[in-house]
Amino acid sequence: MYWRDDYEKKVSTPKKALSFVKPGDSIFISGGCSLPKYIVENLLKKEAYHDNKILTPFTFMPSPYADPDVQKKFRVNSFYMDSVVERLVQNGHADYTPIHTSELPYMFETGRIHLDVAIIHVSPPDMHGHCSLGTSVDISKAATEAADVVIAEVNRQMPRTLGDSFIHVSQIDHIIEVDYPVEREMDPDGTAPEVLEAIAKNVATMVPDGATLQIGIGQVPNAVLAQLKDKKHLGIHTEMFSDGVVDLVEAGVITGERKSIHHKKIVTSFVIGSSKVIDFVDNNPMVEFHPSDYTNDPLLIARNRNMVAINTASSVDLTGQIISDFTGMDQATNPGGQADFIRGAIYGKGRSIIALPSASNDGKFSRIVPFVPKGAGLSSTNEDVHYVVTEYGVAHLRGKTIANRTLELINIAHPAHRAKLIDLAVAMGYLPQDQSKRPYLGKPYPKEFESVETFAGTKVLIRPVKPTDEDMMKELFYSFSPKTVRQRFFSERSVQSRMERMSQVNIDYDLTMTFGVFTGSGDLQKMIAVCGYEREPRASSAEVFFAVRDTWQGKGLGTFMLDTLIEVGKSRNVKTFTAEVLSNNSSMLNIFYRTGLDVSAKLDDDVYIVSFDLVKRSL
Ligand SMILES: CC(C)(COP(=O)(O)OP(=O)(O)OC[C@H]1O[C@@H](n2cnc3c(N)ncnc32)[C@H](O)[C@@H]1OP(=O)(O)O)[C@@H](O)C(=O)NCCC(=O)NCCS
């Protein structure tokens, strides 16, 4: 039959179409911007209980299934976890199926999850009778192909999205013609804008030019996109995207030019957002929609060069396990595609980033938690997570021990919760009994003293040390030549105690200040120099020390470090610096004299006792 005649015959009313739903049927209903509102309203209004199950992915708040009357008539089974579903499930009013979204098409196709009816939302047919699944191809395509009865809202305003996104009129049984806008933006989850911005800025430091991104769902990933405006040649291979991607395409940032597969194409399985993204995906050959078993296939994801998977979480435990549901936090997050993208990024030697606010919106609860709460669901194991990012920085977890992961994560926890987390980590055996809490009790880590400089053509980071720097400090000590050791410690020592290093990295950023100089980044970071000062409580004079890796001496680091310590000391009310310098250490003495300050050096045996006022210049 000619498809147009077929179409005309199938045009129906919701009442007539829904009369084909039988008692006991399992009904799939597409979600997000593709929720077929008109039919769903009619379905949920049904008076009698017919023992029907509703299977559904993501819905916007307020969810149509949250109504207690609906729950009396239908049993809802969600594949997506949000705070409404979480409450319903915990109260026994609904079901939740934890499953990788990539597996759902297979589950439908093979009848492992049986579907009697699929209620979907499509664009009007094209000249060949093909309707596009529009904003949601995801699991809707497989559900359509698996269900015995297909009821479709055919909406003039549903965008005609391209890719593996079409079903033919012949595959639909009942057609309800509608005409309403499908755009819908995610409701804000209450995270403060300045927190979102700070998280996003930290994530942006981890995204190299030419990367292919997967952006998870929610406010954090959206905020990240807004901070990528200065990047170049980004690509997108993702489960879903929203308005932020359109801004970056228009700004020329997302070009897909460096993508190793689907060159120059944006690959996704669904979109949500305002008319901006809905108009963007309409008939746009730059965007390819595919079912979730394709977009979320870890082996395909791995074929993307420089893949960066950016997801969010409800909370993370001190070993780096990602907790996404049943957390009782302000928002739960959907683990659906997360694990597949994280694994795909790892297989492809890319990066997996989990970004989240450090605390609940009211600040009462840390989202970095000592252990996985009872009943909570994990979406990723600790091996899978390379980086965790909060508004306080980036925790580097890849290749780190449990103790180092714990310290990395406590470093980016909310300052109000850090000391308590140390206590709990010690109690659980994650940290040694003698772990210091000094960095977390007084002044917070002074990020304002971080700077990037260039020495001998190499960019180096100079920053106050953190408790996590102990391993790098150890490596630096054992790289020193006997001469450097003698000049720094006035002895031939070949061993440095862990206690000594611990006292250098666990500092209060006030009486004691230690700076490290670093090359490289992430897990390839190396410490090439250390300096610092220490003073007694209420003293105005502090003693300084310096040590530069032998291969980096004579390149200006010592001079720069002293200038830094002088500025930092002044801001911390230090008036004078003192130092003990071996009489033959002309290099160190010259650095002091070159400051132009009023330096005095008194020889005591073989050691000069150097002292100078941080402000007073020599005559
Ligand atoms: C002393 C020490 C900290 C100096 O650090 P450094 O990074 O080598 O210091 P700088 O590079 O700024 O200056 C060292 C020399 O290099 C020169 N220099 C600096 N930048 C340079 C550059 N770009 N090109 C060539 N020479 C340069 C300086 O003029 C200086 O020359 P001088 O010794 O003739 O005065 C380092 O040698 C060291 O760690 N020594 C062992 C430990 C120690 O002595 N500690 C001090 C006791 S607490």
Image (spheres, rainbow, N blue to C red):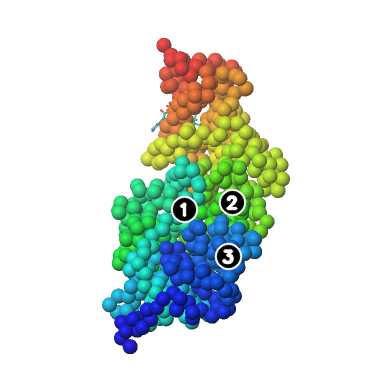
Q: Residues within 10 Å of mark 1 (few under 14, many from 20)?
A: few
Work out which quarter of the rendered image holds the N terminus and state it. bottom left
| Mark nearer the N terminus (2 vs 1) | 1
In the image, 274 versus 230, the foreground residue is 274
For residue 545, what is the image quadrant?
top right
Q: Nearer the viewer, mark 2 or mark 1?
A: 1
Identify the amino acid type marked 2. Answer: Met
Identify the amino acid type marked 3. Answer: Asp
Above or below, 370 against 534 in this view is below
Question: Disc 1 and disc 3: Cα gap in Å?
Answer: 24 Å
Residue 329: numbered disc: 2
Label 3 sits on a secondary structure element that is: helix
In the image, 235 versus 162, the foreground residue is 162
In the image, 597 versus 370, the foreground residue is 370
- The residue under label 1 is 187
| Mark nearer the N terminus (1 vs 3) | 3
- The residue under label 3 is 69
Residue lying at 65% horizontally and 49% vertically, measured from the top left: 370
Question: Disc 2 and disc 1: Cα gap in Å?
Answer: 16 Å
- Locate residue 341, reporting x and y percent: 48, 62
Residue lying at 45% horizontally and 14% vertically, measured from the top left: 616
Label 3 CB sits under 8 Å from any ligand 1 atom: no
User: On the rendered structure, is 204 left or right of 100?
Assistant: left
Residue 478 in view in this figure: no
Residue lying at 49% horizontally and 22% vertically, measured from the top left: 570
Q: Nearer the viewer, mark 1 or mark 3?
A: 3
- Locate residue 514, reporting x and y percent: 55, 32
